[in-house]
C-alpha cells in the first residue's frame, strides 16, 4: 500500500468513490493518466447511493437550463451513456411537475418552449393517465418527456469499471485519515495502513472533504510504518 515517493510518476489519488470521484477517476484514466481510487467504505455508499439521481430539466428555470454549462453537461451525460459498457440503470420516462397556480405552470412551460426545450403542457386527464396514483391532480402540468433517472450505485460502479479498463486501481475499505504535505505541496494521504503518495490528490469524499483539507494546514505530515497487508480490492 505504501508508495514512499512523491515523484511525478506516482499515480493521481482520488479520495472517494461516489459519482464525483468515480467520474474524475474515469476521465483521468481515459486520457492515459495513472489513477488510484481510495474509498473508506463501499462504492457509492454515501450521498451518491441515497441521491435522487435525476437527469433532466424538470423544475429548472428555462434560463438555468439554457446555461452553456448545463447544456454541455447534458451532452456529456449522453456521451457517457453510449460509452460505458456496464448498464447504469437509465430510466427516461419523463417528468410531470406543476407550480402553485395554473398561471405559473403555463408561464413555466411557455418560457421553456420559447427557448426550444422539450416541455409540453398537459391537462388533468393526461396527468392522471400518466400518474394514476395521484390523489388529486392539477388542472394543467408541465411534462418533460426526455427526463429520467439513473441507478446511482450502478452509475458509479460503471464509471469505476471503465476507469479500471483504462488502467486505474480502485480500493474499497481504505480510509484517508489526513492529507500529507511536503513543504507547501500535498503529496498524498495517510491511511490506517500507512501513507499513500500521489503526484496529485483529489478530494472527492463529500462531507469528509473539509476535515481532510483542514489536516493539510493544521497537522504536520507524519509517515508511519505500515504492514504488508493490502486493502481489499473493489
Image (cartoon, rainbow, N blue to C red):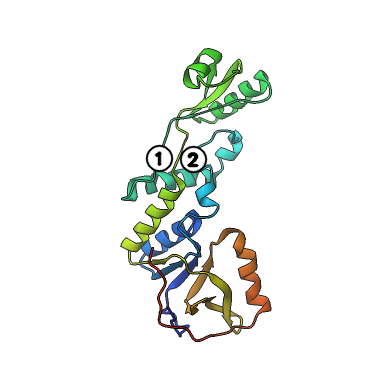
For the point 42% across and 49% down, the residue is 155
Q: Looking at the picture, tell me which residue is in the foreground, 160 or 82.
A: 160
Label 1 Cα neighbours within 10 Å, binned few <14 / some 14-19 / many ≥20: some
**Could you tell me residue 63's position as x and y percent?**
60, 37
Residue drawn 43% across the image and 30% down it: 93
Asked whether 138 or 134 is in front, the reply is 134
| In the depicted structure, whether residue 118 falls above or below residue 31 | above
Q: Is residue 169 above or below residue 223?
A: above
Of helix, strand and loop, which one carries label 2? strand
> Left of 58 or right of it: where is 234?
left
* Residue sitting at the far top: 125
Sort mark 2 into few (<14), some (14-19) or many (20+) by Cα contacts within 10 Å: some
Residue at the (45%, 85%) spot, across then down: 4
Q: Are marks 1 and 2 in contact (CB under 8 Å)?
A: yes
The quadrant of the image that shows the C terminus is bottom left
For label 1, the residue is 90
Q: Earlier in the sequence, mark 1 or mark 2?
A: 2
Q: Position of residue 86 (x, y in %)?
A: 33, 49
Front position in the image: 19 or 45: 45
Tag of residue 33: none
From the image, state whether disc 1 or disc 2 is nearer to you: 1
Q: Position of residue 10 (x, y in %)?
A: 42, 78
Q: Is residue 194 above or below residue 144?
A: below
Q: Which residue is mark 2?
A: 55
Screen quadrant of the N terminus: bottom left
C-alpha separation, residue under disc 1 versus residue under disc 2: 9 Å
Amino acid at each position: 500500500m505504501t508508495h514512499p515517493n512523491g515523484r511525478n510518476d506516482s499515480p493521481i489519488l482520488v479520495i472517494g468513490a461516489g459519482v464525483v470521484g468515480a467520474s474524475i477517476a474515469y476521465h483521468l484514466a481515459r486520457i492515459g493518466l495513472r489513477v488510484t481510487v481510495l474509498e473508506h467504505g463501499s462504492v457509492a455508499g454515501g450521498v451518491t447511493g441515497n441521491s435522487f439521481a435525476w437527469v433532466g430539466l424538470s423544475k429548472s428555470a428555462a434560463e438555468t437550463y439554457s446555461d452553456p454549462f448545463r447544456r454541455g453537461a447534458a451532452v456529456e451525460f449522453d456521451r457517457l451513456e453510449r460509452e460505458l459498457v456496464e448498464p447504469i440503470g437509465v430510466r427516461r420516462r419523463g417528468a410531470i411537475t406543476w407550480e402553485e397556480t395554473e398561471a405559473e405552470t403555463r408561464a413555466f412551460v411557455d418560457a421553456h418552449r420559447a427557448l426550444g426545450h422539450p416541455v409540453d403542457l398537459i391537462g388533468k386527464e393526461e396527468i392522471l393517465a400518466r400518474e394514476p396514483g395521484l390523489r388529486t391532480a392539477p388542472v394543467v402540468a408541465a411534462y418533460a418527456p426526455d427526463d429520467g433517472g439513473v441507478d446511482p450505485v450502478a452509475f458509479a460502479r460503471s464509471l469505476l469499471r471503465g476507469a479500471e479498463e483504462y488502467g486505474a486501481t480502485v480500493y474499497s475499505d481504505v480510509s484517508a485519515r489526513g492529507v500529507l504535505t511536503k513543504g507547501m505541496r500535498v503529496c498524498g494521504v495517510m491511511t490506517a495502513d500507512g501513507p499513500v503518495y500521489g503526484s496529485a490528490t483529489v478530494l472527492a469524499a463529500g462531507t469528509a472533504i473539509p476535515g481532510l483539507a483542514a489536516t493539510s494546514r493544521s497537522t504536520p505530515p507524519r509517515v508511519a510504518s505500515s504492514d504488508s497487508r493490502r486493502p481489499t480490492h473493489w
